Image (cartoon, rainbow, N blue to C red):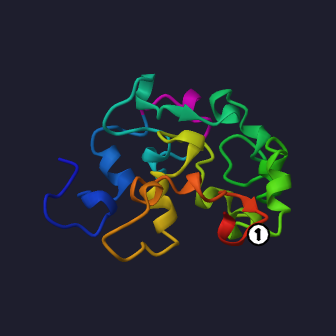
């Protein structure tokens, strides 16, 4: 009902765009508005917060939630509830709570997305099923920007998708973020 077995122009072989697919069963007009805090559900990507397959949390909310999101403190990051406008630019906004990362970003070899204000290129601002609110599995996330190494013999951490065992994700004093 949700996935095409062979091909689709949509991600994950979905039969329709995410919001259209979810609305096939869930009418946005009758979905409780309180937990959604004024978000326009007609155009929302429900999978940013909900896992469509399974969850240990009510409402199929993903397993890890950003503290301001889970506390209902939208104004910690947004100008007003339901608004997509941020109260400050990244990374400054993120560093208001994660000031420990300022040191890593100031090192001689910063990770380009992190220092360039693209925190959400790697991290979800609301929920994730991954540690550190990552937008996906670490190896998949890294390979979305960094070409996968050729060859049949690979270093164990690389083969296991554990890039962070050798590389710092935010910044380093060593070449290649080692």
Residue 12 higher or lower than 146, as above or below: above
- Residue 99, by quadrant, is top right
- For numbered disc 1, what is the local secondary structure? strand
Which of the image's four quarters has the C terminus?
Answer: bottom right
Whether residue 7 sits left or right of residue 160 in the image: it is left
Say whether residue 22 is visible. yes
Badge 1 crowding class, 10 Å Cα cut-off, few under 14, some 14 to 19, many 20 or more, is some
Q: Position of residue 145 (x, y in %)?
A: 52, 72
Marker count (numbered): 1
- Residue 91, by quadrant, is bottom right
Residue 111 higher or lower than 70, as above or below: below
Q: Residue furthest left?
A: 5
Whether residue 27 sits left or right of residue 132 in the image: it is left
Q: Which residues are magenta?
A: 30-38
Q: Nearer the viewer, residue 21 or 58?
A: 58
Q: Position of residue 90 (x, y in %)?
A: 76, 59
Residue at point 76% right, 65% down?
A: 115
Q: Which residue is mark 1?
A: 109
Residue at point 28% right, 70% down?
A: 9
Q: Nearer the viewer, residue 137 or 17?
A: 137
Q: Nearer the viewer, residue 34 or 138?
A: 138
Q: Nearer the viewer, residue 63 or 146?
A: 146
**Which is the main secondary structure of the residues drawn in magenta?**
loop
Residue at point 77% right, 39% down?
A: 75
Q: Position of residue 107 (x, y in %)?
A: 83, 63
- Residue 159, by quadrant, is bottom left
């Amino acid at each position: 009902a949700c996935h095409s077995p062979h091909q689709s122009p949509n991600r994950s072989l979905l039969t329709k765009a995410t919001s259209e697919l979810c609305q096939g069963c869930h009418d946005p007009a009758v979905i409780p508005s309180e937990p959604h805090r004024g978000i326009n559900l007609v155009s929302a990507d429900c999978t940013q917060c909900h896992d469509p397959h399974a969850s240990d949390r009510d409402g199929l909310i993903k397993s890890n939630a950003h503290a301001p999101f889970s506390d209902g403190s939208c104004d910690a990051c947004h100008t007003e509830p339901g608004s997509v406008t941020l109260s400050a630019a990244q990374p400054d906004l993120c560093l208001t709570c994660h000031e420990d990362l300022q040191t890593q970003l100031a090192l001689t070899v910063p990770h380009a997305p992190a220092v360039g204000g693209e925190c959400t290129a790697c991290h979800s601002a609301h929920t994730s099923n991954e540690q550190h609110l990552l937008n996906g599995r670490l190896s998949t996330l890294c390979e979305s920007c960094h070409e996968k190494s050729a060859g049949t013999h690979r270093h164990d951490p690389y083969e296991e998708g554990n890039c962070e065992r050798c590389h710092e994700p935010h910044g380093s004093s060593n070449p290649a973020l080692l």
